Amino acid sequence: MKPRSLAALALLGIATGCTRTARQETAPPQAAESADTARSYGSVARLDPALDSIVPSGARIERVATGFEWIEGPVWAREGYLLFAAIHHNRIMKWTPGQDTTELRRPSGYLGAAPYPGPEPGSNGMTLDGAGRLTVAGHAARNLYRLESLQPGAPATVLVDHYQGKRLNSPNDLAYRSDGSLYFTDPPYGLPTQGDADPLSELSFNGVYRLPGAASIPAGSSPEGREPQLLIRELSKPNGLAFSPDQKYLYVAVSDPRNAVWMRYDVMPDGSVANGRVFCRASASEGRGSPDGLKVDTEGFLYGSGPGGVWIISPEGKHIGTIRLPETASNVAWGDEDGKTLYITASTSVYRIRLSRAGVRP
């Protein structure tokens, strides 16, 4: 996730350096709106005829849950429900079709007894490993952890929290590769000031990493001595990431407003990456937001939250359409039994839209 706007940062005293009081945790709504099929919350901007084979004519953007403050990390559990992170409320939430939204885990990120001094105490991106276990970017916890079951109060195993003896910044998004390794981004957005010069920062860069053998780490083991591999260090604000369907490419969203792009890297046989190049460049004129969470479909098209909503980008890097939302989009996930429903997290709500094509799911 990224700061939503400079105006919002100024209100928090981040952009201006104003004095900021510690954030008091508040509870999100325990019952959210039922799916609203009576209207469409937004529109679809069709920029290329190729979009017609993806987004059906008359497709509706439904709102299935609302009343939150900046939500992230959606992932569809194999048991048939959506999980997402309520970052400001330090919780992981569970939405089941036809039921109210409930709480799966609290706290999800920051574990301290004192109020967290920054705006985002909770966890961020989430994914599943091959066994269906939930792996979480701890964000304000400055780690990656895995829940050993999807039951409330399940034990958690910290997979990694340091690089070369220094604490990670605030892991943001993550994706497993078929070899069991875990790739993740580490920008500063979960630190108290959300900036590179935060007093708690121990690293001089915002990296993209690979944790070999992550899927086979024993439950309950200590992260001490476990070392991730630094793959990329030159990106200013690496954010969302995903693999192409054949895992030959790694896509990384860069949420820096000075260089808002989606990058593409070749994945080497040893799991490292090379030949990074700009895949698609975002345009602020499209609306609020910048490159953030992303996923791909089975044909290799990329779906990335960005200016104005969710950008749909061809495998050649062409922006062919946007699912436009009434608020800033943060991330996306494929859900429902056939994997053809795109769930979208945004500033306050979860949306969904039925598409003609299935997505690649963890």
Image: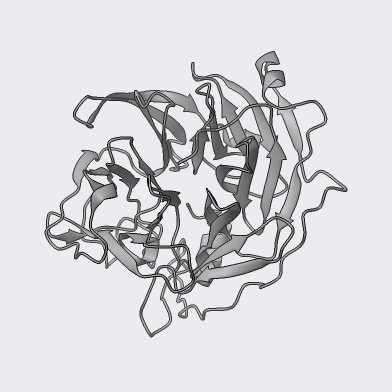
Residue 350 image point, x, y percent? 66, 53
Looking at the picture, tell me which residue is in the foreground, 8 or 334: 334
Left or right placement of residue 78 versus residue 276 in this view? right
Can residue 129 be seen at all in this image of the molecule?
Answer: yes
Residue 312 image point, x, y percent? 59, 28
Residue at 72% x, 28% y is 45
Looking at the picture, tell me which residue is in the foreground, 3 or 215: 215
Can residue 308 be seen at all in this image of the molecule?
Answer: no
Q: Is residue 75 above or below residue 264?
A: below
Left or right placement of residue 203 versus residue 11 in this view? left
Name the residue at the right extreme. 38
Residue 60 image-quadrant placement: top right
Quadrant showing the C terminus: top left
Residue 39 image point, x, y percent? 86, 46
Residue 108 image point, x, y percent? 44, 68
Residue 67 image-quadrant placement: bottom right
Residue at 55% x, 67% y is 11
